[in-house]
Image (tube, coloured by chain):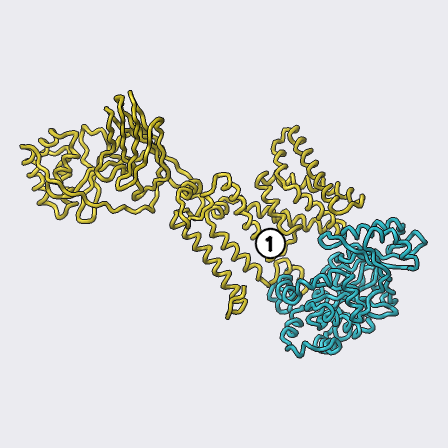
Amino acid sequence: MKLSGLSPRLSFFLLAGVLFIVGILLILQRHWVYEVPLLYGETQTIWSVEAKVEYNAQDKPVSVVMSRPSNQKGFTILKEAAASPGYGLNFLDGNQPQAQWTIRNANGKQTLFYRAEILESDSEEDQPIPAPVVPFVSLPEPFDEAASNILANAYGTSSDNFSFTRELLKQFNHNTTNQQVVLLRNHYDQQLPQLLVNMLHKAKVPASLIYGLQLQDSRRRQGLIPLLRVWDGDEHALFFFPASPSDNFKIKKNAPLLLWQQTGAPVLDVIGGKQSSIHFSMLKREESAFANIAQNLSSQYDFLNFSIHSLPIEEQAMFQTILLIPIGALIVCLLRILIGIRTSGTFMPVLIALAFIQTSLITGLVGFLLVVTTGLFIRSYLSHLNLLLVARITAVIISVIAIISVFSVLAFKLGLTEGLKITFFPMIILSWTIERMSILWEEEGGREVMIQGGGSLLTAILVYGAMTNPWVRHITFNFIGIQFVVLSLVLLIGSYTGYRLLELTRFKVFSR
Amino acid sequence: MWAFPWRLQQHGILGMNKRNVAYISRHNPRHLYPLVDNKLKTKLLAQQAGITTPNLITTIESQYDVSQLAQRLATSQGFAVKPAKGSGGKGILVLNRHDEHHFVKNNGNLITLLDLQRHVSNILSGLYSLGGTPDVAIIEELIEFDPQFNGYSFEGVPDIRVIIFKGFPVMAMMRLATRASDGKANLHQGAVGVGLDIATGKPLHAVQNGESILHHPDTGQDLSQLKIDNWHELLVLAASCYEVTGLGYLGADMVLDLSKGPMLLELNARPGLTIQVANGTGLLHRLQPIDRLSATELNQGPHKRVALAQKWFASEPLINQPS
């Protein structure tokens, strides 16, 4: 561990410092890049959005193409799935992601489902969207002239494409008295959005008609809202269309808007079917960030994403415990080196704490005391038999198992189902504890047994407290970096040469 | 109730963490531990170096030897049975012959030859050894109790712990068994520790269970009157254990035999810290100057080292002289 040219002391602190910084950096990287919240209890909103496509098939090959939402400002797509028995399914990525269902032969009413889990998040940036080429547009008379006049009015009262669009939309407000606007409205009615896009194109303003979905909890059979995207150079902005009395959509204030289709391509295109329709239903979940990270991380398989979450669920659960052990060991270090608490067996309290996690604290404590006390009585009899060490420990192990079995059955018969949890105790460890305590009793007396046993239990309870703390669990499970931080702390504690807290009373004679 | 850490620093008190990091792990190479953790090895090494130890009667290494116990002890009137790898006085039995098949313990209890054989079997199986490894029993001649210590110890012979740092005796204390310590000389079990002046061997300060005392709790003997003969010789013997073992930070447990003088009982590579309480002073003020010595100053014979230590570490007694 000695670096050339550096004193061992300096290189030691360098090592500890580097470990600490690496740990902190890993934590921050995980936080910033993968958006794992640092604090437990931060909730995130997840929307389950389901699109239901219905059409009538006509006994011939069918291809259904539906636009899919992509990651966009405010939303991250976590998971996508589609249910469509008998259909070939492809998720086509590209400028406008699409889902394509295909089938050689279908007849009658068909229903296809697409479902996405969408996380509300602030990390996604607006994707740059190139402006479409403006086509030449001319409307049939007399509408073309009316449109030209309206455009001329808007042009006069605006300075750029965005203010021009705002002025234009203002004129189409439904309580307007402008005769030309009323003429256009009455004629186009349902196609008003397309008309407005055409008018903008006529004025050489790049614009496209896109569709968004307003996310509202527990809504069914919702439709998409048409929106207007207008470009001014490289910048673009979204505009809502003015509402009209015949509109079947209402724009809700404060409802988050998910853009379903962003390029002006059709939302749904069914080839080989008729009477197609698409409806949306959605469900909102507020989940602690803890649960969502798993989904977020397990779906990202790059090398830097060294995450436990990429393991199967079962292994994850195991690691959740394994990653807590360093925290327990750190506490043992603190208690022994800084405080000076004596325990029987250095890391036995950590194992006892792990058992407490399974049994819950009170049940665990009662069970532990019952087993150890009974075990000590049996062990004191065994010591009269003058057995060899290995045989004696084996006898203690068998006794411990017998004690646990008896207590479990007894607890069950008495209706104390909690008592069954006693089987979670590590029996070999328990046996060694009994053996060590028993020897300690014979050699040093009951007082030392109480000191060390009490110290062990106190340590176990503190370790249990730390290990069950949701904050600690959150940090250890989601940030590998914390292990480096713990390691650097342990190194620093290991080089502490000052007095232990309990030595201050041990040497109290010197307080003069 | 509490001592402030800076106050302890002022007194030069050595704490457990500093002892482990700065003294034991720095000055005691791990591979030398077996020399002191095994009393038989220590004894043979010491004999080679001319350090007196209690005479070895026999060693019991196998169950066959156990059955031979009666013959091997036939000529001995009194003896001590010890596990070679025991620590803290565990498994030590001090016996005097009663008749052919019975022995008397220190506390007057009678045990049979069969009991003794069982005890030795237990030692062999590792009951008292560090880590429960198989062990060897050593049987030694008894130490001839010096009557000048009459009344200072309740059962059991008092022993003297000397801390040897790089061959220099830095601190010493006599451990007196009490009724509370059950005839054992372990301070944490209630034995009395009497700090001894390195220069003269005179008592400096006495403690029991961390409290200062003036008289032996069982016999009422005035501890300030404690006197130790052959002090210089005892320190030289202890100091030469440095050459024997190569361990830089060492605790040597010595006893005084009436006819043979100072003898080495056992060595300890992790000597405890209570000796500071018994002496009423800290170890650091003595260890640090030795740490700063040059190689030539360190490279002296045990006699010269002891003479230097006696000059440097002479102390005033803290025990009140009786009026």
Image quadrant where residue A260 sits: top left
Which chain is in yellow here? A
Subunit ID for the residue under disc 1: A
Nearest the viewer among B125 and B87 is B125
Give the residue displayed 60% in from the left and 54% down from the top: A335
Q: Picture coordinates of residue B27 (x, y %)?
A: 65, 67
Give the residue displayed 27% in from the left and 26% down from the top: A61
- Which quadrant is the N terminus of chain A positioned in? bottom right
Furthest-top residue in view? A108
In the rendered structure, the answer to whether residue B194 lies left or right of residue A131 reads right
User: Mark 1: which amino acid?
Assistant: Leu
Residue B117 visible? The answer is yes
Give the residue displayed 32% in from the left and 28% down from the top: A112
Vertical side of B244 occupied by A183: above or below: above
In the rendered structure, the answer to whether residue B231 lies left or right of residue B21 reads right
- Tag 1, which secondary structure? helix
Which chain is in cyan here? B
Q: Picture coordinates of residue B257 (x, y %)?
A: 85, 67
Q: Which residue is mark 1?
A: A335
Vertical side of A113 occupied by A455: above or below: below
Give the residue displayed 73% in from the left and 58% down from the top: B188
Nearest the viewer among B253 and A94 is A94
